């Protein structure tokens, strides 16, 4: 299982104010690094990983079937939105999208973006894949973000960052 690369972690630490509340989708080893700097809430579908990193607030949201979407026909299941509505913190400085596992599930974040704090900076891992590139295209169009920055770490592993507060009004 890939965890977030050092260049993404370094960028998060440099960009997000120390001690802020931070929301992660998809927990793993990388969660431990975030906990050193932030008040971390992490959404995890798999009970095996819930509670693995001490100090992180886990939100256990199982995967459930989603209504078929024409633009993202590859998406068949995503986190249970009822759990997210109930348990997500009200505000946070940033979101890291690194779950649920499998590229084809990631567009669920775009389709459910209304559930999340609209002021939070968004980091999306693994954007070199078709599903995520498609999702980013829709984000830039809908949010009128002037620039989504793509980063390519030494492993040719791309991730992206955008700040919805940069949106063109
Ligand atoms: C890409 S991983 C999340 C990684 C996390 N953000 C990190 O940087 O460590 C996505 C999913 O893989 C699963 N996972 C986490 N740790 C794992 C491990 N050591 N081996 C296999 N799967 C794991 C979890 O269900 C998690 O939601």
Image (tube, helix red, strand yellow):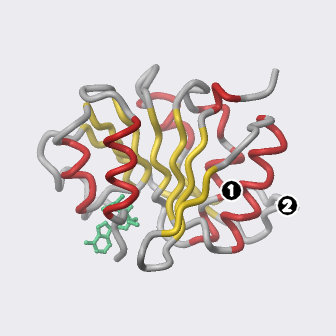
Residue 64, image x, y percentages: 56, 57
Residue 161, image x, y percentages: 56, 48
Local SS, label 2: loop
Do the numbered discs 1 and 2 sit on residues whose CB atoms are within 8 Å?
no
Residue density around tag 2, few if under 14, some if 14–19, many if 20 or more, within 10 Å: few
- Please give left or right for residue 45 compared with residue 148 in the image: left
Q: Nearer the viewer, mark 1 or mark 2?
A: 2
Residue at 35 percent across and 42 percent down: it is 59
Picture quarter with the N terminus: bottom left
Local SS, label 1: loop
Seen in the picture, residue 95 relative to 8 is either above or below; the reply is above
C-alpha span from label 1 to label 2: 13 Å
State yes or no: Cβ of the residue under disc 2 lies below 8 Å from any atom of ligand 1.
no
- Which of the two discs, 1 and 2, labels the residue nearer the N terminus? 1
Q: Which residue is mark 1?
A: 66
Q: Which image quadrant shows ligand 1?
A: bottom left
Residue at 61 percent across and 62 percent down: it is 77
- Please give left or right for residue 67 compared with residue 96 in the image: right
Q: Which mark is residue 91?
A: none
Q: Nearer the viewer, residue 68 or 2?
A: 2
Residue at 52 percent across and 35 percent down: it is 121
Residue 44, image x, y percentages: 37, 53
Residue 148, image x, y percentages: 67, 48
Seen in the picture, residue 31 relative to 94 is either above or below; the reply is below
Q: Which mark is residue 71?
A: 2
Q: Nearer the viewer, residue 108 or 126?
A: 126
Residue density around tag 1, few if under 14, some if 14–19, many if 20 or more, within 10 Å: some
């Amino acid at each position: 299982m890939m965890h977030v690369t050092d260049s993404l972690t370094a960028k998060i630490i440099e960009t997000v104010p120390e001690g802020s509340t931070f929301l992660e989708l998809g927990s793993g080893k990388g969660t431990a690094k975030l906990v050193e700097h932030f008040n971390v809430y992490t959404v995890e579908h798999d009970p095996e990983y819930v509670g693995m990193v001490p100090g992180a607030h886990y939100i256990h949201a199982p995967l459930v079937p989603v209504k078929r979407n024409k633009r993202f026909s590859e998406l068949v299941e995503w986190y249970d939105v009822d759990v997210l509505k109930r348990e997500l913190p009200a505000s946070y400085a940033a979101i890291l999208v690194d779950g649920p596992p499998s590229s084809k599930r990631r567009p669920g974040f775009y389709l459910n973006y209304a559930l999340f704090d609209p002021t939070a900076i968004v980091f999306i891992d693994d954007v070199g894949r078709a599903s995520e590139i498609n999702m980013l295209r829709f984000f830039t169009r809908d949010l009128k973000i002037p620039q989504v920055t793509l980063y390519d770490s030494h492993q040719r592993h791309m991730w992206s960052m955008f700040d919805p507060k940069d949106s063109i009004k």
